[in-house]
Amino acid sequence: MSSLLIRNVKHLVTCDGEDRVLDGVNIYCEDGLIIDISTETHKADEVIDANDMICFPGFINTHHHLYQVFTRNLPQVQHKELFDWLLILYEIWKKLDYKTVYLSSKSGLAELMKNGCTTTSDHHYVFPQNSGDLIGAQIAAADDLGMRTNFTRGSMDLSKKDGGLPPDSVVQTIEEILRDSAELVEKYHDSSFKSMHRIALAPCSPFSVTSDLLRESAVLARELGVRLHTHLAETKDEEDFTLDKYGMRPLEYMQSLGWVGRDVWYAHGIHFNTDELKVLADTGTGVSHCPTSNMNLSSGVARIPEMIELDVPVGLGVDGAASNNGTNLLEEIRVGYLLHRLNSPDNDVTGYQMLKLATIGGARVLGREKEIGSIEVGKCADILLMNVSRLDLVGTYYDAQNILSTVGLKGYFDYTIINGKVTVREGKVVNLDEEKLISDANHQIVKLLKD
């Protein structure tokens, strides 16, 4: 049995159902679970003194593309909107292989972890021929670092010659996709309490997959007991595409194929109308809000204040990394807060609400709110600690619930704890040679970008 005691926490922001902030408490954990939150003391294998620290639940990233870490900040795709941006990048991504996906995933996961992410989803949908077990490459990287994951088996079967965007070499037949999806779920999906790996099925988007693939993926996912994920309502171009091809708006089209319900979450959700927001609320269909990516690609602003009011399940996602140029969910909290202050000043999202989107909101979107997303007895010990005795936080820590949105954190968390294990200590990833990873990653990037 392993144990951890976090002693004398200055401010504990629980993000629980009562929105409690507790001062001067101890958090005692055994075998990855929170056992006690009180002023009682316990003997433990490791003790962290949190006298000068604010404690938060670990962040939950509900949408990402880790392979894109290696195509950030490329000049040829700056100032592009989504469709043109994709057409350029697919010509690079069609060269992905196991080593590239392993190193890009490890780099992105380490960056996420240092910035407070303890659980991440990832939407991997580019599978070049003979590229190997790319989902396995991601899971190997996550296991090296100790990250909790909800990875997805993405897919595309509509290539450029069929009216889609991707090149022929990265699309697959429906039969190949469904067979591999079932095999990956069998191999990697763990539905048990506090599991470290889960798999969902995730056809890429309405403009890169066929109706048959969407319909059959939904049937298979429900047979296997896993969740469904895709991009939706991200751009007006997508809306024009489904109206022209199917005579339906994107959500109506997806609903006709069985793609609404508590086991479904969409990335972006910018261009839903009022009636569609009510459909999401009534069916419990989730949305991953990706503010930085949406601004960078000029896609628009999601109607998050209304979604919160209607009780639509909403989490935060970093997206990209190529559409964001970062892999930092901490940054999304502050960016999202400021975006909605600007866009909806009369009905904005509070700083604490943005924090809750990154924590318990993300857990709800992934169907894991009983395990993660808040600091409560019986939940997984996924915990962040931030020392407030630092120059950039002087005079700021009197409102612990809002500080990450209103002030932000200009560095890494002092501690990231996942499943009761310290994975980041004093801002450094435990058991990772960062210099070697940086060198290996940059070497692989040169190979990937070579003509």
Image (cartoon, rainbow, N blue to C red):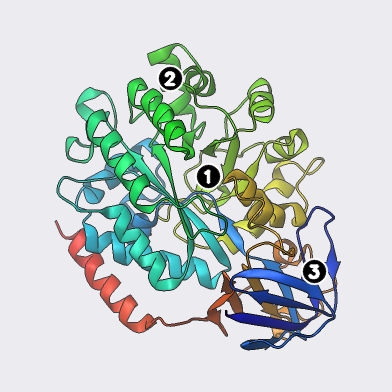
Q: For residue 40, what is the image quadrant? A: bottom right
- Judged from the image, the secondary structure of the residue bearing numbered disc 1 is helix
Q: Where is residue 121 in the image (x, y as percent from the top left)?
A: 48, 52
Q: Nearer the viewer, mark 1 or mark 2?
A: 2
In the picture of the structure, the residue carrying the numbered disc 3 is: 400
Judge whether 441 appears above or below 78 on screen. below
Q: Which amino acid does label 3 sit on?
A: Ala
Q: Position of residue 310 (x, y in %)?
A: 75, 33
Q: Label 3 to label 1, Cα distance in Å?
A: 28 Å
Q: Label 1 to label 2, Cα distance in Å?
A: 20 Å
Residue at 64%, 46% in the rendered image: 364
In the picture of the structure, the residue carrying the numbered disc 1 is: 294
Q: Which amino acid does label 2 sit on?
A: Thr
Few, some or many residues within 10 Å of mark 1 (<14, 14–19, 20+): many
- Which disc, if any, is residue 242? 2
Left or right, 422 with reference to 109? right
Residue at 50%, 26% in the rendered image: 259
- Which disc, if any, is residue 308? none
Q: Tell me, yes or no, whether the two marked residues, 3 and 1, touch with CB atoms within 8 Å.
A: no
Left or right, 322 with reference to 33? left
